């Protein structure tokens, strides 16, 4: 009856009122239908990003404004037999078994912190960003302190000018392994590589 009224150009809220139904009834979608739509979206994103796993897909869904538990995405991912992408994603994320070498310009960037001191005695923390293949310095930023968001801002600035690398390498410093930076890198489709403990030479 409510749908008939809407067909007759009565507003949905008014139609529900006339037939004695709550307004939420018109907008209600059965849970099964919601799951079907979510499954379809996950499959679409998996096809668009075949090298990525459910963590990356979950990050994309969050960017779309969907408030989803990561475990729910993982469950659907497995039920849809999309586990191959998840395995590749874990391999790309860790990258600690065999150090990957850059094969062409823009393939791998490395970033790190070095320290210096002003004439007044103030300690400066300097973020360096380098193209591992060409050895070209892409950015050099000095501050008294850095957060992961500061690092992201520098990356965003350089990527806007040069385009994104395939991978980025760093040590396990707190600014580089922060969750918010990791999600941002995943959304940019940039893989991460972390150097092995005790082997700083791997970082460029």
Image (spheres, helix red, strand yellow):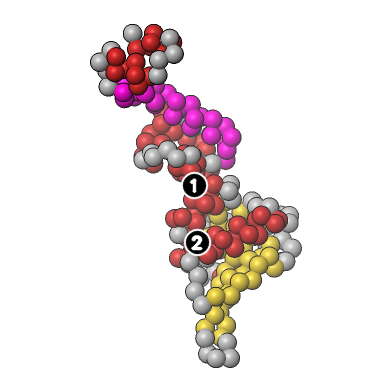
The N terminus lies in which quarter of the figure? Answer: top left
Q: Is residue 157 magenta?
A: no
* Disc 1, SS: helix
Q: Nearer the viewer, residue 20 or 190?
A: 20
Toward which corner of the image does residue 130 lie, by quadrant? Answer: bottom right
* Residue 6 percent across, percent down from the top left: 41, 13
Q: Is residue 80 left or right of residue 71?
A: right
Q: Which quadrant of the structure image shows residue 161?
A: bottom right
Badge 2 density bin: few <14, some 14–19, many ≥20, Cα 10 Å: some
Q: Nearer the viewer, residue 7 or 33?
A: 7
User: Residue sitting at 54 percent across and 30 percent down?
Assistant: 44
Q: What residue sits right under mark 2 in the picture? A: 149
Q: Which residue is depicted at the point 37% across and 36% down? A: 72
- Residue 44 in the magenta stretch? The answer is yes
Point 50% across, 61% down: residue? 149
Q: Nearer the viewer, residue 175 or 150?
A: 150
Query: Could you say where residue 49 lies in the image, as x and y percent from the top left?
Result: 57, 38
Q: Looking at the image, which is closer to me, 39 or 33?
A: 33
Q: Nearer the viewer's eye, disc 2 or disc 1?
A: 2
* Image quarter (top left, top right, bottom left or bottom right) of the C terminus: bottom right
Q: CA distance from mark 2 to mark 1?
A: 24 Å
Q: Which residues are magenta?
A: 23-51
Q: Earlier in the sequence, mark 2 or mark 1?
A: 1
Secondary structure mostly seen in magenta is helix
Residue 90: mark: 1
| Location of residue 155 by image quarter | bottom right
Residue at horizontal 48 percent and vertical 43 percent from the top = 63
Q: Residue furthest left?
A: 20
Q: Which mark is residue 180?
A: none
Give the class, few, some or many, for how many residues have Cα within 10 Å of label 1's Cα (few <14, many ≥20).
some
Q: Is residue 32 visible?
A: no
């Amino acid at each position: 009856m409510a749908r008939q009224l809407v067909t007759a150009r009565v507003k949905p809220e008014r139609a529900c009122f006339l037939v004695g139904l709550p307004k939420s009834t018109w907008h209600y979608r059965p849970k099964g239908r919601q799951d079907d739509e979510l499954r379809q979206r996950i499959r679409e994103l998996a096809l668009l990003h075949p090298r990525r796993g459910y963590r990356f897909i979950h990050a994309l869904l969050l960017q779309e404004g969907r408030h989803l538990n990561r475990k729910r995405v993982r469950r659907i991912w497995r039920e849809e037999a999309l586990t191959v992408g998840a395995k590749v994603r874990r391999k790309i994320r860790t990258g600690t078994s065999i150090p990957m070498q850059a094969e062409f310009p823009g393939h791998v960037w490395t970033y790190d912190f070095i320290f210096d001191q002003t004439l007044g005695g103030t300690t400066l923390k300097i973020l360096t960003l380098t193209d591992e293949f060409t050895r070209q310095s892409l950015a050099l930023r000095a501050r008294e302190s850095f957060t992961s968001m500061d690092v992201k801002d520098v990356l965003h600035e350089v990527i806007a000018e040069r385009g994104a690398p395939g991978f980025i390498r760093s040590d396990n410093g707190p600014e580089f392994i922060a969750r918010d930076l990791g999600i941002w890198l995943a959304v940019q489709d940039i893989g991460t590589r972390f150097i092995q403990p005790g082997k700083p030479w791997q970082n460029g």
